[in-house]
Amino acid sequence: MKKDSKKNIKHSSSSDETSTSTEVIAVKVDDLTVAYNYKPVLWDIDLEIPEGVLMAIVGPNGAGKSTLIKSILGILKPIAGSVSIYGKPYEKQRQLVAYVPQKGSVDWDFPTTALDVVMMGTYGSLGWIKRPGQKEKKAALEALEKVGMLAFKSRQISQLSGGQQQRIFLARALVQNASIYFMDEPFQGVDATTEIAIINILKELRKAGKTVIVVHHDLQTVPEYFDWVTFLNVKKIATGPVKDIFNDDNLTKTYGINYKVSIQE
Amino acid sequence: MYTNKTLKVINLIEYIELVFTDYTLRTITLGTTILGAVTGMLGSFAVLRKQSLLGDAISHAALPGIAIAFLITGAKDSNTLLIGALISGLIGTFWIRGIVTKTHLKSDTALGLILSLFFGFGMLLLTFIQKQPNANQAGLDKYLFGQAATLVESDVWLMAIVTGICFIVMLTFWKEFKILLFDADYAQTLGFNTKFIDILITTFIVLAIVLGLQTVGVVLMSAMLLAPAAAARQWTNSLSVMVLLAAIFGALSGVFGTAISASQDNLSTGPVIVLVAGVFVVFSFIFSPSRGLLFKQIRFIKNRRDLELHKTLAFMHHIAETHEDISHPHAVKLLNNFQGYTRSTLQKLVDKNYVQLHGNMWSLTKTGFEVASNLYTKQSTEDE
């Protein structure tokens, strides 16, 4: 399986103009295994994500997509395996990584404003005890503007729509000014306008040389939105450029049913 | 329970005078006020972490510690007993954490389990102590329902010092507390040691509860933690204001609770303080402007009226549109079949100068026409 992925990456560098010419591996996962109560959720995952790709992680419910992201970020403890970010352990590279959790993972009735949530993105670089100041506030306002939410900065977060809440989470990650972005279902429960706004921001990030990894559910939009894809169902089924591996064969292997999608050329 | 030597039946004005002159009353009032403030403050964190029941479990878990401390030392010194309470409270708390992280059990199960096991064990020890031929034994059961009259100056000093430390720690780690409460996983990816922050908050909650046991007692202590915070949440959408308000509500509950209990015969202080805190909660749930039931109902009625008005206006606009001259008069009869229309809505439209009435005929004014044509487009642009 390891060989497979390497082959795909090499293949891509010659054929896919969107990926960088010199192969820099942004995220490397080795033999990652995660289990809840003896039941493996992720089994022996090897994964290399090259720098500058916009990658979708697809797979059925319970395939371990969120678990993969959470284990890479150290939120869940794997029973085996290691993760490195640009060749160094994740713990030393936190500043390079930003995370957008699932919208439903927090209580939106928490007494705070949109601006305040976005400011939380600056807490990591501030470190312990130090309070955010003018510089941090300015960065947060800029991020709010990028996601089109500046007018809502003083809004209590429970009074935002689902799509607006998702944009706030995205803005919070943008403030971190990271190199690698992990996003857990950013398109879940958002309307078409927000989905387009979000994907445009993700594409901008890729243009700026960032690596973006997205847990994604809508298979129809994979070829349109992403240039890289990982099929996951407890084991890694395949990973590589969308052009080369987003096909009925891999979809069938991942989803277990005879899946047919028409990929526009 | 409470009316011994110094405190007789007095009225409220006498009480206020007494607070400044009477040593015992002053000590008790100060004690309950500080206690209310610190539990209110920390209670906000417990409520926002959805750990409302944690306080209940901790206070019940403290009971065996009190009994064991008495059995070991044989003394009734309140500080010794509180250290016992602190230790067993902490043990209970970390067992709850352990159960939640190491087993499949959910936190409510873990809380209930620890609460009843520790409380049962504590009660067992208390009955055992009561059968001992020991002169000092009487009075341990005051920790069940609390007895504010036993507060002495050193107890109040201890409360003040712990509250002070707690306040300083809270200010220092404000940012960390806030992000842990809102999104613990995210805080961890930013590199914060969430376990440390969590333990810090929990330890202070345990400390505050243990300090309150003597005054309010094991059984009612959790109300001191929850009621001021629940009331405060109704009034604000800012975490700092919520914590401040909860501290004020808690302190006021302490002041009024002590006053009421001191001015009446046979009212024990702890339950009265808790009831006063309960009054704050009920008042806040009804009268808070943004979340209160009363204003919600008022807003609902107002919205319904506005909607009726808008519907009627839109209907009139629909009719007026068919004529080139918008102020062309129409019969009022036309409106009768329209369900949003009543005499009073028509009158309101006239009052707003949207519609003119001439006998049985109505016509839209220029402003009325403009408002009507913007009615729905305006709403949709306001939406986002």
Image: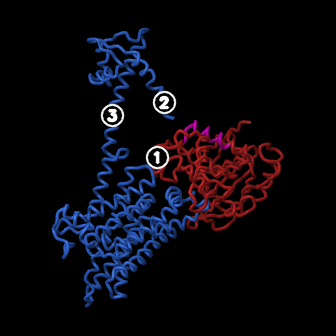
Q: CA distance from mark 2 to mark 1?
A: 20 Å
- Using the rendered image, report if marks 3 and 1 lie on a common chain: no
Q: Does the CB distance between marks 3 and 1 fall below 8 Å?
A: no
Magenta stretch, main secondary structure class = helix
Secondary structure under badge 3? helix
* Label disc, if present, on residue B302 of the rendered structure: 3
Secondary structure under badge 2? helix
- Left or right: B325 in relation to A190: left
Q: Badge 1 is on which residue? A: A158
- Left or right: A14 in relation to A42: right
Can the viewer see residue A11?
Answer: yes
Total labels: the figure holds: 3
- Left or right: B254 in relation to B46: left
Q: Residue furthest bottom?
A: B133
Chain letter, disc 3 residue? B
- Chain whose colour in the figure is red: A
Q: Residues within 10 Å of mark 2 (few under 14, many from 20)?
A: few
What shade does chain B have? blue
Specify whether residue A199 is painted magenta: yes
The magenta region covers A190-202
Q: Camera-side residue: A201 or A75?
A: A201
Chain letter, disc 2 residue? B
Residue B158: % across, % down: 38, 74
Secondary structure under badge 1? helix
User: Is A197 situated above or below B119?
Assistant: above
Q: Badge 2 is on which residue? A: B380
